Amino acid sequence: MAEPLDLGVDLGGGLRLRSPVLVASGTFGYGFDAPQVDRGVLGAIVTKGTTLRPHEGNAPNRIAETPSGMLNAIGLQNPGVDHVARVYAPVWASWDVPVIVNVAGDSVDEYVGVVRRLDGVPGVAGLELNISCPNVANGLQFGVDPGLAAELTSAVRAVTRLPLMVKLTPNVTDIVAVARAVEDAGADAVSAINTYVGMAIDVRRRQPVLSRGSGGLSGPAIKPLALHAVWQVASAVRIPVVGIGGITTAGDALEFLLAGAAAVQLGTVNYIRPEAAREVHGGIAAYLQERGFQDLGALPIRSTSVPTHA
Ligand SMILES: Cc1cc2nc3c(=O)[nH]c(=O)nc-3n(C[C@H](O)[C@H](O)[C@H](O)COP(=O)(O)O)c2cc1C
């Protein structure tokens, strides 16, 4: 009899997931809004970015459709970490799917404050640091500077033993340098990527479509770019890489797994086809079965003959 398939993944720091299919921050709320989604196929739910204090987010327009994607400038709308820890986490503690809280902030102190509040709270299975937020002190984003990214990661690492994944921004010259820096600073895993900065202009109003002017581009339009970023990062770090960006089908997810990702997150597709996670999970299982592979470890292309840089 054939061995049963094992779709489990290890994201480091003791975080073992039963499935490589996660849902991405900002596209699944706090897990309460999509009862039609079969949580049984999910490896984990990643929450909306959570800050120390509640945020209302930006004024409308906050989203705009683009060819093969969308722009968003939601502005970290969230109820604040205290509400998340007191009201949401106790519910998550009764679910069989782990919930990873996406953490955001304006300063190292704010990130540390959020993480301190979440540390040891039942129902919080892990953290994803969103390092693409502006650093008010010097106007930079933590994620565009390897030194700042490392400083933030080690400050957070020092106050929690929760599994710690750091989410990389693609809006950099060298994503590998940032990935290596956060790995050295104690991240258990990296996720890549967040959205690309973009914009749209309403030619009749002669104004940017989004109230903030710019926003983050996501969806199928960014998939080849995201895949290349993951390919580069996965060949440069030893910690697990979680691939994100434009995944809508099992074929897309498999490309990321072949590129070296340990798992994937589905984002924008959740708005279009909430059943996508089930299809992607089923498609990955079928692919492994057809090829006689028993687990995901067989997937990554470990070829030294393929160039890692364009
Ligand atoms: C409406 C919306 C809100 C998002 N909010 C967050 C967020 O709060 N924190 C974060 O790290 N990423 C956020 N993201 C980025 C996604 O998690 C993901 O990295 C990105 O959309 C690329 O994946 P996709 O092409 O599959 O959507 C958001 C994306 C969208 C579309």
Image: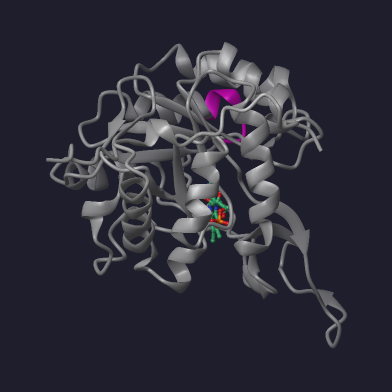
Does residue 39 appear left or right of residue 55 in this picture? left
Quadrant holding the C terminus: top right
Q: Where residue 231 sits: x, y (%)?
A: 64, 36
Q: Quadrant of residue 109?
A: top right
Total numbered circles: 0
Check residue 108 for magenta coloring: yes
Q: Residue at x 26, y 53 (%)?
A: 41
Asked whether residue 169 appears in the rendered view, the answer is: no
Up-down: is 127 above or below 270? above
Q: Where residue 114 sits: x, y (%)?
A: 43, 31
Q: Nearer the viewer, residue 53 or 168?
A: 168
Q: What colouring does the structure picture have?
A: one colour
Q: Residue at x 53, y 40 (%)?
A: 258
Up-down: is 21 above or below 126? below
Q: Residue furthest front?
A: 1
Q: Where residue 46 sits: x, y (%)?
A: 39, 45
Q: Nearer the viewer, residue 17 or 235?
A: 235
Quadrant holding the N terminus: top left
| Stretch in magenta | 105-110
Asked whether residue 155 appears in the rendered view, the answer is: yes
Q: Quadrant of residue 145?
A: top right
Does residue 254 appear left or right of residue 225 in this picture? left
Check residue 111 for magenta coloring: no
Q: Residue furthest bottom?
A: 204
Q: Where residue 235 sits: x, y (%)?
A: 62, 25
Does residue 162 appear left or right of residue 221 in this picture? left
